[in-house]
Image (cartoon, rainbow, N blue to C red):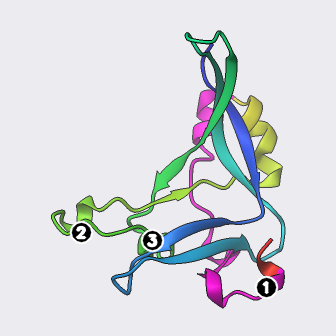
């Protein structure tokens, strides 16, 4: 069975920011307070040892080398040039695009593989966020 597209709901997601040279976890929420719907794939597989059928999923990510906010995340690799760093982001699917993501053609789904506008993000260091926002 080929992998199936899915939406992964999330109130927030966290990413490591290494701008200071140390890992500082940042939390990303939406400015409108809605949950994220993150692009994912799911599938089932059989454990050959036990015969158990297991469902699993993965979040899709997109290159964020040129993205103003997300290019700050993830530890730099000192042996790699700036254009070879692993800067990536999860891919949000807007509520109005869920049907297209889940049931559209491959080309329909590919057209949704993009990063959200920076204005949609409410982000900052986890310890600096108000407690009420840490859901």
Q: Which residue is mark 1?
A: 131
Residue 111 or residue 20, whichever sits in front:
20
- Mark 1 or 2, nearer chain start: 2
**Could you tell whether 7 is left or right of 71 in the image?**
right
Q: Earlier in the sequence, mark 1 or mark 3?
A: 3
Cα gap from disc 2 to disc 3, whole angstroms: 13 Å
Residue 83 part of the magenta-drawn span: no
User: What x and y, as percent, mark residue 130?
Assistant: 76, 88
Q: Dot 2: within a 10 Å radius of its alpha carbon, few (fewer than 14), some, or many (20 or more) residues?
A: few
Left or right: where 40 falls relative to 132: left
Classify mark 1: residues with Cα within 10 Å, few (<14), some (14-19) or many (20+).
Answer: few
The answer to whether the residues at label 1 and label 3 have Cβ atoms under 8 Å apart is no
Please tell me which residue is depicted at 63% across the width and 74% down the height of the picture: 27
Q: Position of residue 8 (x, y in %)?
A: 73, 47
Q: Write down the residue under mark 3.
A: 73
* Above or below for 38 versus 12: above
Tell me which segment is drawn in magenta. 105-132
Residue shown at the point (38%, 65%) measured from the top left: 65
* Mark 2 vs 3, N-terminal side: 3
Q: Nearer the viewer, residue 113 or 5?
A: 5
Q: Secondary structure at mark 3?
A: loop
Residue 42 higher or lower than 9, as above or below: above
Of residues 48 and 33, the one drawn nearer to the viewer in this rendering: 48
Asked if the magenta segment contains residue 128, the reply would be: yes
Report x, y in % for residue 95. 82, 53
Q: CA distance from mark 1 to mark 2?
A: 36 Å
The quarter in which the C terminus is drawn is bottom right
The residue under label 2 is 82
Quadrant in which the N terminus is drawn: top right
């Amino acid at each position: 069975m080929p992998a199936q597209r899915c939406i992964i709901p999330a109130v927030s997601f966290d990413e490591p920011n290494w701008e200071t040279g140390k890992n500082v976890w940042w939390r990303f929420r939406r400015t409108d307070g809605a949950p994220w719907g993150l692009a994912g794939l799911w599938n089932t597989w059989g454990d050959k040892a036990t015969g158990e059928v297991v469902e699993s999923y993965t979040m899709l990510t997109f290159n964020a080398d040129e993205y103003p906010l997300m290019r700050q995340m993830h530890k730099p690799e000192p042996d790699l040039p700036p254009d070879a760093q692993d800067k990536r982001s999860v891919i949000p699917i807007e509520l109005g695009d869920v049907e297209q993501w889940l049931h559209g053609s491959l080309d329909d789904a590919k057209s949704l593989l993009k990063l959200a506008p920076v204005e949609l993000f409410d982000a900052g260091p986890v310890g600096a966020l108000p407690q009420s926002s840490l859901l």
